[in-house]
Amino acid sequence: MVETTDIQVDGWQTQKRPPMLIRKFEFEDYSQTRDFLDRLAEVSEEMGYHPSLQFDRTQVSVNVSPLEETLGDLEVRFAKQATELAEKTQAG
Amino acid sequence: MVETTDIQVDGWQTQKRPPMLIRKFEFEDYSQTRDFLDRLAEVSEEMGYHPSLQFDRTQVSVNVSPLEETLGDLEVRFAKQATELAEKTQAG
């Protein structure tokens, strides 16, 4: 079992207590922000994983807390997918 | 000019510093949560006002900060609309 604190995901900050992967994404306008949120919602439904999201017009903060006690493969996969979706959205 | 601190909206908490109207809405499932967020996004676009929203699977926290220095009519109208939309969504 990989210890939570060792988990690193490119571009994300790993918080130890409580364990969480954190990243803020910036978008050009509200429609890009909504586009990203819609895509992320689909991934959430597919993976059965719902992060805590905070957003306003052009910024989305994604907080990935573990379903169990520690961060694991599911959370890492979700974070990587979020990065990919953000890059696709930003590329327009 | 109504002083920010006097502004009260039924069901919402008025924070003084920084001035903000705050309310957390609970929903039955993720599709209700997304339904509410979609409806709120339309109101945001119509009114040109975008609150800070935090949500996970079944909870949405709405933070209504003023566009100018103090809370005013726009923010109060947005909060009231958010209440209405949440009730409509919860009624299913």
Image (cartoon, coloured by chain):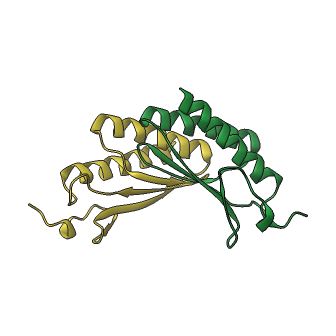
Chain colours: A yellow, B green
**Would you say B45 lies left or right of A35 here?**
right
Query: How many tags in the picture?
Result: 0
The residue sitting at 81% across, 57% down in the picture is: B72
The foreground one among A86 and B82 is B82
**Residue sitting farthest toward the left:** A1
- Residue B82 found in image quarter: top right
Question: Residue B18's x, y, as percent?
Answer: 67, 71
Is B84 on the left-hand or right-hand side of B68? left
x and y percentages locating residue B70 in the rendered image: 79, 65
Identified at 62% across, 48% down, the residue is: A29
Pick out the residue farthest to the right: B1
Along the line of sight, which residue is nearer the eye, B21 or A88? Answer: B21
Determine whether B74 is above or below B41 in the image.
Answer: below
Q: Quadrant of the N terminus of chain B?
A: bottom right
In the picture, residue A2 is in which quadrant? bottom left
- Percent coordinates x, y for residue A56 in the rendering: 59, 54
Q: In this view, does A11 lie to the left or right of A25?
A: left
User: Which residue is drawn at the image coordinates 48% and 33% (left, top)?
Assistant: B32
Image coordinates for residue A41, horizontal then vertical, percent: 41, 39
Q: Outermost residue toward the front?
A: B10
Q: Residue at x 61, y 31 (%)?
A: B88
In this rendering, the answer to whether A80 lies above or below A9 is above
